[in-house]
Amino acid sequence: MSWRKLARLAVVLLAVFVAANIVTWWISGYFQRESSYRGEVAAVASHPDVHIVFAGDSHFAVPLNDLIDVDPHGPAYSIAFGGDSLRECFAKLRQVLNDSHTIDTIIVSADPHMFAKGRLESSNRSFVDWYFLRAGDRTGLKRGWASALLDQVPLLNNDFLQYLRKEAGTDLDRLRGRGRGGGDTEGEADGSSWDKLTEGQRRAAARSTGAEDHAGTGEYQLPFYWYERILALAHEHHVKVIGMRFPVHPDYAAQAPAAEVAAIDHFLLRNGVAQIIDLRGALSDPRDFQDEDHVNDAGVLPLLPIVEKRLGRPLMTHPPEQAAANTPAPH
């Protein structure tokens, strides 16, 4: 085969590869999630009056994002996302502090499970690699520069390939009649109504999930490392850091070892966190919860005034009830 034919074949193969990547990025649920993920961060720049930013996982994201983020002139915004670890919080906070110069306070999850084994890795890892690449910072790139760059190409993204394998396995189980209910997105409802369960059922579920989520709390250095970097970042930008814990079922909270929670609090306060606001017991009505550790759309309405009172600052330009009634449909 002549060099000219080889060149033509290479061009055709490259065109097919590029087209396949575009189609994959466009139709895949994985990359739709990535787009939503990065869109939440980029949107901070379109909120000119934002002074307070929340960062954490679904414990923050589920009740907050749909309420406060739609207020274009609101004083608060949430970049929390289900599955985030403190590494993801750091990378996104660095981006928004560079993009917006009105922020004076960041509220970061101080939930004990953020310091547990289950938060050493995040399903959003490759989404955030992009922010480390932009910052020229390889410290958060587990597999180095080359792997992180390749992951920006959909069909070469290792996490996407793992996602495909998992989806294929789920589809196969469903075809065989062994499908599992619910989704794999943290904080996603499984179709059952929490308040319709008996208290015994709720307590059992809370203990089970709490034990799993808090396994290894305080035993690993990595979460403390990323919290230290968040605090250093805040100091660099002259921003206050507040640690916060959102409401959960008491049996869920009880699975976090008290001694380890005290040690986490000591670490945070010693290293520059201005205060820790623990709201784990602030709500008790089952109707305010989506499950054992997530407040629902109804529960955020009484929760928001509690948070505002503890902060001594408003989080919205209008009362939550009025804002919720005027919330547009998701786009």
Image (tube, rainbow, N blue to C red):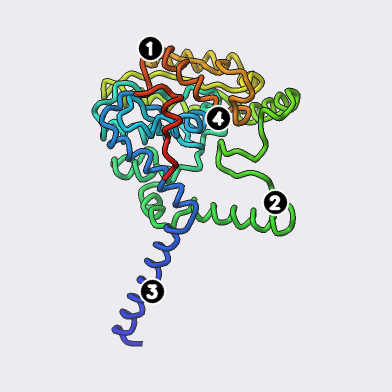
Distance in Å between CA atoms under marks 1 and 4: 23 Å
Would residue 90 appear left or right of 46 to someone viewing this image? right
Contact, CB < 8 Å: mark 1 with mark 3? no
Contact, CB < 8 Å: mark 2 with mark 4? no
User: Could you tell me the amino acid type at mark 2?
Assistant: Gly
For the question of whether residue 60 can be seen, the reply is yes
Residue 13 position (above or below residue 118): below
Residue at the disc numbered 3: 13
Q: Tell me the mark number nearer the camera, choosing from 1 and 3.
A: 1
Mark before the other along the chain sequence, 2 or 3: 3
Crowdedness of circle 3 by 10 Å Cα count: few (<14), some, many (20+)?
Answer: few
Distance in Å between CA atoms under marks 1 and 3: 60 Å
Residue at the disc numbered 4: 296
**Position of residue 3 measured from the top left corner of the image (x, y, whole percent):** 30, 83
- Which dot marks residue 50? none
Q: Tell me the mark number nearer the camera, choosing from 2 and 4.
A: 4
- Tell which of 254 and 279 is nearer to you: 279
**Position of residue 36 measured from the top left corner of the image (x, y, whole percent):** 42, 45
Residue at the disc numbered 1: 312
For label 1, the SS is loop
Rendered image quadrant of residue 192: top right
